Image (cartoon, rainbow, N blue to C red):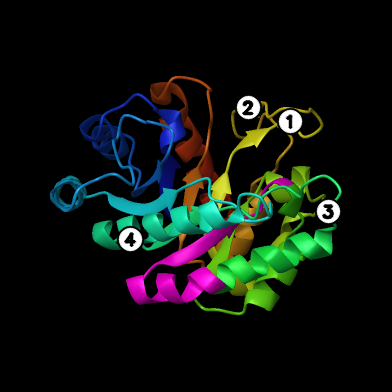
Amino acid sequence: MKYAFVSFSCPEASLAEVLRMARDYNYDGFEARCGFGHGHGIEVSLTAEACADVKQAFADGGVVLQVLSVSCRYANPDTVAENIALTRDYIQLAQRLAVPLLRVFCGEITAGRSREASRLQIVAALRELAPLAEAAGVTLAVETHDDWSDPAEMRTVMEAVDHPSVGVVWDLMHTLRGGGTPMEEAYRLLSPWLKHVHFHDGLLELDRLVFLPLGEGEIDHRPAVKILIQNRYQGYLSGEWLDWEPPQLHLPRELQSMLRYEQEAVKL
């Protein structure tokens, strides 16, 4: 399988430093978190010339820029219009960079609003954006996150949108921690739309995310790895760690753990 890491592992690293770490630690790809001023500099304000330079840097470095990860979300009626407009801008950026996936969120359900009304608004926004994404060669990848961590809820959104340029990012922690769904069932529900996977271990019951090394937390990744191998998953698994250890500690260690899980799954 193919592995990437999100720039939250090294938010201050320059693009050259990101590429060096990816090569040194044997990652195949990179997921650029945009809108947070990370040192990689991949932002919606990039000029066409700067985009060409970024594309060349990844080509020369032998690393794939697989995902632009953004905070666009569509559940809040007061902000949905500006989020749709921002998503349009990011679709154009992804097109200029030849990045296949743009990670977005559904967003939290606002106080006093029903889930059904929120879902209808999310679906309408994604339907509006889907043809633009398709024309740009980009897929909108909606993460199982916040009030939409339950894979059954995300499946309902995907069925309603029903567009090939809208898919799912399966966050292995969120569907268990926020959705209460075992790995096998989460995969069954999401597999028709699965485009990208986030992995990270930690504790499940706290109000805030606590990351731990793979195998030391409460998220057993082995069932997910086995399922993905058995079903010939072709996308990337992207390690996502926010405000955690220095990258030189966790990037090589966590990848080695995932590769070990692969080896164990193949032997079973």
Would you say 157 lies left or right of 24 here?
A: right
Label 2: element kind: strand
Q: Residues within 10 Å of mark 3 (few under 14, many from 20)?
A: few
Identify the residue at horizontal 67%, vertical 26% (top origin). 210
Q: Is residue 185 visible?
A: no
Quadrant in which residue 268 is drawn: bottom right
Q: Which residue is labeled 3 in the image?
A: 113
The front one of 61 and 162 is 162
Q: Is residue 23 magenta?
A: no
Q: Is residue 232 above or below residue 84?
A: below
- Residue 244 at what x, y percent from top left? 53, 22
What amino acid is at disc 4? Gln
Please tell me which of labels 4 and 1 falls first in the chain.
4
Q: Which residue is labeled 4 in the image?
A: 92
Q: Is residue 170 above or below residue 125?
A: above
Mark nearer the viewer, 3 or 1: 3
Mark 2 vs mark 4, CA separation in Å: 36 Å
Q: Residues within 10 Å of mark 1 (few under 14, many from 20)?
A: some
Label 1: element kind: loop
Mark nearer the viewer, 2 or 4: 4
